[in-house]
Amino acid sequence: MVVNKSGGSSSKGKDWKRTGFILAFLAPTIISFCIYYLYPIITVFVTSFCKWDYTNIANPEFFGFKDMWSNYKYLFQTYPYFWEALKNSSAWALLAVVLQVPVATLVAMTLAQPIRGINIVRNIYVVPNMISSAAMGMIFLQVYSPLYGLVNPVVELFIPGFSENILLLRGPAFWAMTGAYIFFTGTTTLMILGNIKAIPEEIREAAIIDGVSGIKLDWYITLPMIKDTLRTVSILCATAGFLLYNEVYFLTKGAAGTYSISYVIRELAITSPRTQFGRANAVAVIQILAGLVIILLVRLLYSISFQKKRRAKA
């Protein structure tokens, strides 16, 4: 009995030491998360119900329970561009999932093939992603220029005498903005490509022996094996599309119906002469909630799609 008790005590001591080591190891990360992420998020949420502008920069004032939704009412009912911004940003998030991710997946599957010279092609494909989005915005500003850009001469082939600035036309401006970023999928492609390369070769060989090859090999083997990575990059691309800012700012600065939600934040928080920080944080709360909705919808989309694929296979 004594031996058992001492053995149990020794085991518990080792467990406590192991737990203590894990907590000590995680402590810097947890502390950093609380200081640089959790505290700002809580501050943003709380001050969204406060009057906080140039008159009380150092002392936000709670509106009171009766008027606590004042900042949100301003956004939903008074601010003229909020709904347009939310609609455009949501459309960019959707396009990132249904267009950008499939393009990146197809390119990654192509680059994964054992073709001679594919490494050079892979490096060339990634080069545009090494340029900052601000610089790419300036490049596309020249491309869309009605004076010397490449777009207007192409449009003139179908509409003779066309001399408008495509960035100032409400409908085309949205798609011009979309084209300035949607096909630059170098980083996403590399993430998918890395996961494809990590698929054990034995699985592919077994599928080939069973008579699966070509498109069927990618459809029934490759895609199911990389579904977690596809879900992750879909969330990243969707949130990046929702937060599109540099391209919008450098191409149009929000003219012609191309406001994005991030541009609204910029305008309310910084360029407003009254520095409406409370209203800006109300926008930030909506942005955080939108990010959570994007994550849930993408996860739901992938779970439904792969469940259907498993049922069809069965």
Image (cartoon, rainbow, N blue to C red):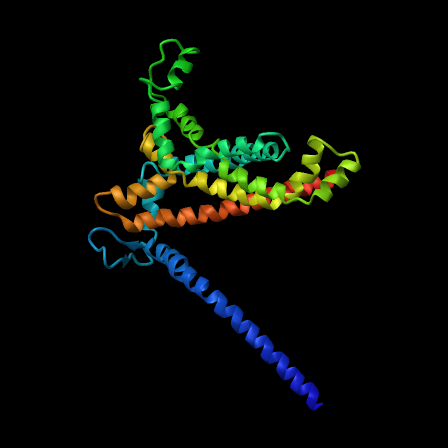
Q: Which residue extends farthest left? A: 55
> Left or right: where does residue 187 sit relative to residue 118?
left
192 horizontally vs 176: left or right = right
Please identify the quarter of the rendering in which residue 110 is found: top right
Q: Nearer the viewer, residue 38 or 11?
A: 11
Looking at the image, which is closer to me, 293 or 192?
Answer: 192
Give the answer, above or below, for where 232 lies relative to 138.
Answer: below
Q: Is residue 221 visible?
A: yes
Which residue appears at 43% of the width and 10% of the height? 157
The relative height of residue 214 versus residue 11 in the rendered view (above or below) is above
Residue 226 image position (x, y, % from top left)? 62, 43
Residue 236 position, x and y percent, is 49, 43
Instruction: Identify the residue at horizontal 42%, vertical 64% (top origin).
Output: 31
Q: Residue furthest bottom?
A: 2
The image shows residue 41 at horizontal and vertical percentages of: 39, 56
**Image quadrant for the N terminus?**
bottom right
Identify the residue shown where x is 52% and y is 73%.
Answer: 20
Based on the displayed image, in which of its 4 quarters is residue 192 positioned? Answer: top right
Q: The C terminus is located in which quarter? A: top right
Residue that sits furthest to the top in the current view: 160
* Depth check, front residue: 136 or 233: 136
Q: Quadrant of residue 34?
A: bottom left
